[in-house]
Image (spheres, rainbow, N blue to C red):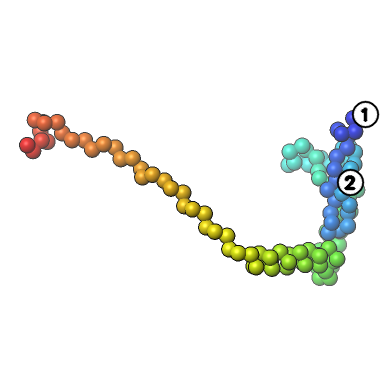
Amino acid sequence: MNVSTDLRRCIGSAKFGIEAHEARVSDFPTQPSQKDGLGRMCRPHWTEYTRALRKAKAQGATEPTVQSQAAARVATNRAARVAAAKPAKKPEPIQTRPARRPPAIEPEAGSQGDAG
């Protein structure tokens, strides 16, 4: 039994209090759109997560959760840091050389277009 191939990381959800953990690969639902064909959460946590989403939607999600309050504080602090930071210097424009023009075609001496 190879532990590294038999276990996979379930990402969990901080918003709904689902801890990330290691789970058997067989506990993950198939997800054809993912590169490896498996979901990111194990079946029990995926069910818990979708149930919590439906419940939050039904309640209108009007009362803030502890996680959303913390996320709001982090966003506020980040916005304050960004506002206080010096504006970034504009990058130097990329210097390009002018497009090459094809050489001008001049008539040969003595030809019909020669004025001399």
Where is residue 20? Give x, y as percent: 87, 49
Where is residue 78? Give x, y as percent: 71, 64
Label 1 vs 2, first from the N-terminus: 1
Left/right placement of residue 45 relative to residue 80 reads right
Q: Is residue 87 above or below residue 21?
A: below
**Residue 62's image quarter?**
bottom right
Indicate the secondary structure of the residue bearing disc 2: strand
- Amino acid on which disc 1 is placed: Met
Where is residue 56? Give x, y as percent: 84, 63
Could you say which is closer to the camera, residue 33 or residue 21? Answer: 21
* Image quarter in which the C terminus is found: top left
* Image quarter in which the N terminus is found: top right
Could you tell me which residue is drawn at 69 percent across and 68 percent down? Answer: 80
Residue topped by disc 2: 21
Left/right placement of residue 74 relative to residue 49 reads left
Could you say which is closer to the camera, residue 22 or residue 29? Answer: 22
Whether residue 65 is visible to the viewer of this picture, yes or no, is yes
Could you tell me which residue is drawn at 12 percent across and 36 percent down? Answer: 113
**Residue 89's image quarter?**
bottom right
Q: Is residue 113 above or below residue 85?
A: above
Outermost top residue: 1
- Amino acid on which disc 2 is placed: His
Could you tell me which residue is drawn at 83 percent across and 48 percent down? Answer: 11
Q: Which mark is residue 1?
A: 1
